[in-house]
Image: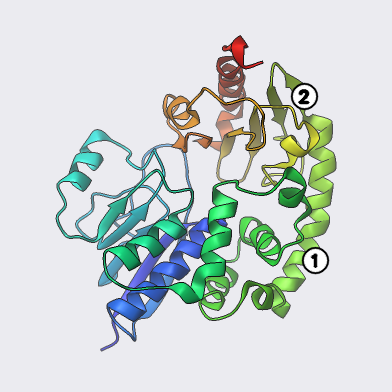
Amino acid sequence: MTETVRVLHHDNCFDGIASAAVFSEFYRRHVNPNPAFEYQGLAHQAGSYRLDDRLLAPVNVIVDFKYSSSDRLTWWFDHHESAFLSKSDESHFREDHSGRKFHDPTYPSCTKFIADVSRDVFGCSLDHLQDLIYWADVIDGAQFRDAETAVELREPALKLMLVVESVRDPALIRHIIEAVQSRSLSEVVEDEAIRTHFDRLYGKHLESIAILKAAMKSNGGVVEFDISETPVSGHNKFIPYHVFPDSVYTVGVSLETSRAKVSVGTNPWSHVKPGHNLARICERYGGGGHAVVAAISFRPDEIEKARRVAHEIAEILRSRPDHF
């Protein structure tokens, strides 16, 4: 009987799909050469997470997402500082001796973390995926050469990033996860279905740049914007630094069908060294992420609360005048 492996990954995230792809290659090469993979995206939301109803396969995997203390979880990899919903979850992880659950917040991307664990712990090299691993590290770690590179989307990986971050079609996401395991990124982005989505989404990307420019204001090194009443929900998070290159932080409010969101980020090209840990700030409000980029999810009907929290965070980020 074919073994079913269900991989839950951070949805609409380049690092999330790349992590799913890299884990799949590791599993196929090191554990079982002929499994049946299932892929499901996980999105951050307001309140607690209950994943038991998704961890129903013989082998259940979570990559690039928060920990679950469910006994049904077989493998776990994450690199977020805010990887645990509670102290009990963290204790559960620390007490696990399966050798299949890994966490290291020092990694820019979960993709490279999985690749390194695969090589260093299990002796399984994934050198044929180096281009995918490299770009996942660049994208999730905001290690672009400059803001123009991140916004203009000329590289194949960045074109694929736009599609991954924007589409809401699980079948297409699965197609991308499977494709990047065996094809180059330049070949994948020219796939007819993916190219069609990119051409449409790039037009919207250009529109979102104009909308964000109109919505943004910069004060004390912090760029603030509220696009909750515009057609834009998801957007390229580097646009504010392209428009305001001297900024240090951004705080944005957006609204999706499933949540109101506060996004907080740090300008990776700023000449000023940031002094705030954004994950820790967002954790105060039930969110989390990384030291340099984080977010908080609220219910869609809590948009006013999201706006209030965004204003409070912007004030916190302006609270160290020595930065500016």
For image coordinates 45% across by 34% down, the residue present is 287
Residue 220 location, quadrant: top right
Q: Residues within 10 Å of mark 1 (few under 14, many from 20)?
A: few
Residue type at mark 1: give it: Asp
Residue 204 position, x and y percent, is: 80, 53
Task: Residue 38: name its quadrant.
Answer: bottom left
Which image quadrant: the N terminus? bottom left
On screen, 229 above or below 160? above
Residue 298 seen in render:
no
Residue that mark 1 sits on: 199
Quadrant in which the C terminus appears: top right
Q: Is residue 239 left or right of residue 73?
A: right
Amino acid at circle 2: Lys
Which one is in front, 49 or 148?
148
Give the percent coordinates (x, y) of residue 39. 44, 69
- Residue under the image location 69 percent in, 47 percent down: 236
Figure check: 14 above or below 83? below
- Circle 2 packing at 10 Å, graded few (<14), some (14-19), many (20+), is some
Residue 217's tag is: 2
Q: Is residue 181 visible?
A: yes
Mark seen at residue 103: none
